[in-house]
Amino acid sequence: MSGWRIATGGRIDRSRPIQFSWEGKCLQGFAGDTLASALMANGVSIIGRSFKYHRPRGLLAAGLEEPNAIVQLEAGAATVPNIKATQIELYDGLVANPVNAKPSLGFDLLAVNSVFKRFIPAAFYYKTFMWPNWHWFEPAIRKAAGLGEAPEEIDPDSYEHRFAHTDILVVGSGAAGLAAALAAAASGERVLLVEAEAELGGGLLDDTADVEGLTPLDWRDHALAELEALSNVTIMTRSMAFGFYDHGLVALCERLTDHLALAARRGPRQRLWKVRAARVVLATGAFERPIAFAGNDLPGVMLASAARTYARRYAVAPGRRILVATNNDSAYAAACDLHDAGAEIVAIVDSRAKSGEVADAMNKRGIPVLMEAAPVKARGRRRVRGAGVGRIADRAIIQSFDCDTILMSNGWNPVVHLHSQSGGSLAFNSSLEAFLPDKAVQPAVCAGAAAGIFDLDLAVASGRAAGAGAAVRASLPAAVGPTLHFADGDASAGKAWVDFQNDVTAADVQLAARENFRSVEHLKRYTTLGMASDQGKTSNVNGIQILSSLIGKPPPAIGTTKFRPPFDPVTIGGFAGRAVGENFMPLAHTAAHAAALAAGARMENYGSWLRAAYFPGPGEDEDAAVAREVRAVRAGVGLFDASPLGKIEVKGPDAAEFLQRVYVNGVRNLKVGRCRYGLMLSEHGIVYDDGVFARLADDHFLVGTTSGHAAAIADIFEEWLQCEWTGLDVLVENVTTAWAVMNVAGPRARDVIAALGTDIDLSRDAFPHMAYREGRIGGAPARVQRVSFSGELSYEVAVPWRYGRALWNGTMHAGAAHGITPFGLEALMAMRIEKGFLHVGSDTDGTTMPQDVGFGGVVAKKPDDFIGRRSTMTPEGVRADRRQFVGLETLDDGAAFVPGAHVRVAMPAHAGPTQGWVTSSIRSPTLGRPLALALIERGEARIGETVEVWDLGRARQARIVDPRFYDPEGVKLDV
């Protein structure tokens, strides 16, 4: 027999039937159902297949701790993989399908894995697939891995981020949570009450015991009415607190439209909240533990509390003939509710020696109770058909029952995840056999079941104390009964499931212990216990207890694995918010962006800028376009939009002294109107940035940086001035986007600038290389630097940003008579490689120091200290075998080397270790041959040596050379 709808009761709306689809079949539920309850009501027993062995699985739980009922919701762009059926509110037209089952749930081809179970135990993947080559097996394994299928289309939904501040945040709306919110609100403080479910009340929705003389629902309604009338209280439903971070930051995921039919959804689907709270009350409840026995994963075996929730909240019973197995009183209430609904309770099996009044109540109902007993094995193949019950002492079967459902309760685990995420510690309670919250490191307190307090009146009292800021008094809970343990090597342990989703059995834990993986973190990784999407909510403590019995180490000494956020899966869209597509990293446009597009530029992302990569002509690919642009600049003149280059003004009486401490090379002796190339280091002595700085006046400098580091360097300058060198009188301003820069480069660059019209003397003697001038060009005020990254005569003309496009257009018009060619960043990079110019980030890494790139002499001669100097003199910095910046030329007629290819000693007999790598590489349009730059051990001393360049199994010969391939004397710069 399968699940069935109870004729009366529940909190569903029977006047609103809802049609939905499961595995292609049209079924019906009611408003208020979850997908899980609706499937149970329709008699669906098998809802999923396990990850590894593809065993049939049914519902185990009723909330977010559910490990089995993982489904694929909807299809196409709206599909959502790996979502729990217990968390899906039923809506009209809902389409859901199982995951990890091909071709169907009823006939899953990979269920054959179960036949070979003994050959693929825990960690088999660490010991197999090694020979002859992992790559032989990889495609098939990757195809079989995973559960649901990620959508291939763009997510049509939108998501938002919001921020909130509150005095008191209460997580959970059960008895303790509502009491805490009321007590906190009474003080006049701002209170935010959040609940993950659609309906407030938590466990009160399922309970029957009176609360302060009222029924649970009446007490809830009175509390809610009072809270809703208070202006200082905000209540949020469908809002899960999934992370507790430093300084009172709690992250929430609010589901706004997930419960609506697709056609009815408007606005954001979900909203991620970052809430700062002065105090936090965690009334998060507790999860029931399953019992490990042979066959406990069969459909029809479920948690007793889940069955009670389905019966009382959704009016669904999981079966007709039910066996209840427990070691505590809570399962008796579930038995009563199902018995009242019309189900037959064939027996209650209790591992304790005595159960007191609850057993007497069962006797009055005619329900047999077996004490000091526990389920040993379940019978059945695709659904429970019966169970064997044995003595708790020796597991000898004493009675067999025919049943279609087994409800189990192995005690309760307080939901301590958020407490632990906040930094709080845990203490093991031997009576409850569970970990309870202990010391808090933030202003947070647990109340109710989350604190191990399960009596409703005591839970309310604990909530009031927590809300008022008082201490929560621990209760003395009744001890749970013993649990069956398996002897090491017991064959039945291989059929007793601990982690249902990841197919981890008690035998797998035994194997880990035998192989000495006895740390709880090692156990987790060796067996994958607790690594599934449910993160071990129903399995971790059971696994710890099994390990404890095997190695003779108490659970508190073993401890728990690290509790990490998110507490429950959160959509990637929720984390991303509106930072998707073009909003993921909004790209800045250069001053002449529109003009470059009009000229046919192909744009690419370079850092935070969208820049012209190249300008293809008819029929040209990228390589052809770049080669043409390079040749045009070398032979005539080209125009490049260099507006993103960093520009930072440094001004004040101590400006020169400040920069003297920043740069590797000297600054004080730079004359007004002159420029100098310089390196900046991090405090670790690592090359951080480079660029040209110009002295505009005695107290005024213009610092050039790479485009990607402009903002960071401006911040670094401010930090040093405000925190370290507070006595220096200096002002710093990032003016990168205040000035547009057009680079006119090539032998005819001077002619083009002159044709634009200028009052600046452009002659060689009046305006030499590495000089700075101010004046007007094309009628606009201009700052001009004669600097070059191409190796040709070059002017960088800076005008106020608003004139940038006009300067581009004017330059193209003035240069038309000289054959001017627009060129992109790729052509500029090709020319700088030909010239052997360093590109920080490409030709350096996180270990490169100035002495590695030719600045060793500069460092030695500079008498002053500067940022990072001391780090360059550490033993690591003065090693003789440091990798140094050099050139490489091929000894064959092959293609250009692949950047990242390793350089090693040419050893024909066998491969040697890497001695460096190729950092930049092209086939030179100017020289007609491949060129490369590299970082190689002792490279400067090995000029002329033949080495081997290796990439993915292919080795080629190369020669180490001076990196200045083109115009090494610099004649073309000084014209």
Image (cartoon, rainbow, N blue to C red):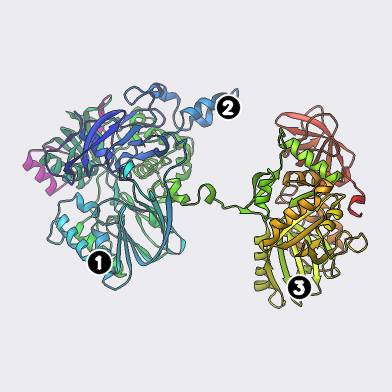
Residue occupied by mark 1: 182
* Residue at position x 12%, y 61% in the image: 213
Taking 495 as reference, is 265 above or below it?
below
How far apart marks 2 and 1 lie (CA) works out to 60 Å
Q: Residues within 10 Å of mark 2 (few under 14, many from 20)?
A: few
Looking at the rendered structure, the kind of residue marked 2 is Trp
- In front: label 2 or label 1: 1
Sequence-wise, the earlier of marks 3 and 2 is: 2
Q: Real-space Cα distance between discs 3 and 2?
A: 60 Å
- Foreground mark, 1 or 3, reads 3
- For disc 3, the marked residue is 655
Image quarter hosting the N terminus? top left
Q: Is residue 438 magenta?
A: no
Q: Nearer the viewer, residue 192 or 936?
A: 192
The answer to whether one can see residue 882 in this image is no
- Circle 1: element type: helix
Quarter of the image with the C terminus is: bottom right
Residue 605 location (% of width, % of height): 63, 47
Kind of residue sitting beneath label 3: Ala
- In primary-sequence order, the first of circles 1 and 3 is 1
Range shown magenta: 353-380
Q: Tell me: 145 left or right of 16.
A: right
CB within 8 Å, label 3 to label 2: no
Rendering coords of residue 423 (x, y %): 44, 59
Q: Residues within 10 Å of mark 1 (few under 14, many from 20)?
A: many
| Residue denoted by label 2 | 134
Q: Pick whichever of labels 2 and 1 is earlier in the sequence.
A: 2
Q: Position of residue 356 (x, y in %)?
A: 14, 48
Judge whether residue 375 is colored magenta. yes
